[in-house]
Amino acid sequence: MTPLESLTTQRILTALADACARWSNADFPPRVRCLDAIGARTGYSLPVVEFALDTLFESVTYESLHESIAAELGDLALLDGFISDGRILRRARPAGTVCILSSRTTIGVAIIPLLFALAAKCSVTVKDREDQLVAAFLETLAQEHPAFAQCARALEWKGDAHDLLGYDAVVAFGDDATLREIRAACSPTARFLGFGSKASAGYIGSSDVRVDEELRVVAEAAARDLLLYDTQGCMSLHMLFVERGGRYDAQRVAIALAQACESLAPEFPIGASDPQGDARITSLRALTALRSSLGTGALLTAPRADATFIVNPPRDEAPPFASRCLAVFDVDTVADARAYLHDRGIALEALAVAGTDPSKLEQFATMNVSRICAFGELQRPPLNEPHGGKPRIIDFLQFSIADAP
C-alpha cells in the first residue's frame, strides 16, 4: 500500500485543491521565487509566465477535480473501497509507481497528471526542469499532509540518466522521436501515456462574422491565442481557415488580426530573442513578400507585437510553426481544411471556432481534434476536459471486481 491509501479521496482532493489555491495567489512567496527561473528556462516574458501559472492553478479546485474524476469513474467511492454495482462489487486501486517527464517548453505541464496520479493514490516521480517548479509545488503539497512527501518527489536528470524500467506507468511529453525513445526505455508491461507534437487551428465560417464589430471581437480573441507562449505551445494558434462566401476573406481577417496584435503587444510582450528563430522569420517574410510581388498570397506584419501573417501560402507547404507567425487560408469548406491538415500530416490538439452552428460540429470532429472551443480559449483548457483525447485518471488505476455476497 502507498501512504496515500490511508487517506480518503475527499481528503486528498481537498489537499490538492488547497495547495493549488495557494499557488494561484500571485504574491505566494514560493511562486514569486520561481518566476525568474521559469522565464529564463522558457524564454517567455514575465506577463506570459504569470498568465501560465494563473491558468494552471486557478483551474484546479475541489469541484473541478471531483467533476473530472466522476466523469470517468462515475462514483469516487471506488477509490476508497468496493462498491456495489448490481450483482458485482467494484474497486479502483492505484496502478503502482508513476513517472512523469516534464515538457521542455510548456510551463507546469507535469503538474496536472501529477495531481490525478496522486488522486489515484499512486507513488509519483516527476522529472523536474531547471526552474524546479514541480519541486516547489510538492513542498507546498507536503505541508497539506505528510503523506504527499512520502508519495511524490521531483528529480532532475539528463537524457537516459534515470532508469524507467521500474515504473508501472510513464507519462511523457515531446516529439514523436523522443516518445519512441522513452517508450523503448520503459518496461514492456508499463502503461505509457505519450503526448506528442500537435498544433491548433482556427476556423471562421462564411456566416460566423457578419459586421466589423464581430470581426474585431474575434480578431482580439484570436490574437491572444497567437501571442501567448510565442506560438510555441500545442494549443497556440498556428493556422487559421477562413471560409469563402462570407463578408471577410483571409486577407481582411489577417489585417484585423494584425491590428489586434498591435493592441495586445504591451499586455503580452515577446520573450527572449532567439537568433536562429529570428533568422527563420526574416527568411519567411522575404519569401512571402517575393511571392506576393508575383501575385501569390500576401504578407502582413504587426511590428509592435513582432507578429507575422502569411496569407494563402502554398498548399503543398506546412504552416511556418515559427514564433508569432500565423498562416491564414481561404477555404471552401471544412473538408478543404481537413484535407490540408491530412496532406501535411498535422495532428490537431484544439480547434477555435467563431460560430456555434451545431451542424458543423460533426464536420469539425472529423479533423480528429481533441477539443473545440471559442477563439480566445485555446490556451485555457478546462481541467475536466481530456488532454490530447486521453482520460485524466483511469490510466493511473487498476480495477478489481468481486461477486456480491
Image: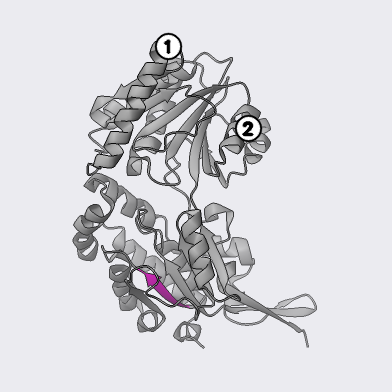
Residue at image position (33%, 23%) is: 286
Marks 1/2: CA–CA distance: 26 Å
Q: Position of residue 208 (x, y in %)?
A: 55, 23
372 up-or-down from 242: above or below: below
In the image, the segment drawn in magenta is 123-127
Instruction: Report which quarter residue 331 is drawn in.
Output: top right
Does the image show residue 385? no
Specify the farthest residue to the right.
87
Look at mark 1 in the image and give the residue it sits on. 294
SS class, disc 1? loop
**Badge 2 amino acid:** Ala
Q: Nearer the viewer, residue 64 or 372?
A: 372
- Give the percent coordinates (x, y) of residue 240: 48, 30
Question: Which labelled disc corresponds to residue 339?
Answer: 2
Q: Position of residue 64 (x, y in %)?
A: 48, 59
Where is 232 relative to 329, above or below? below
Q: Are marks 1 and 2 in contact (CB under 8 Å)?
A: no
Q: Residue at x 43, y 16 (%)?
A: 212
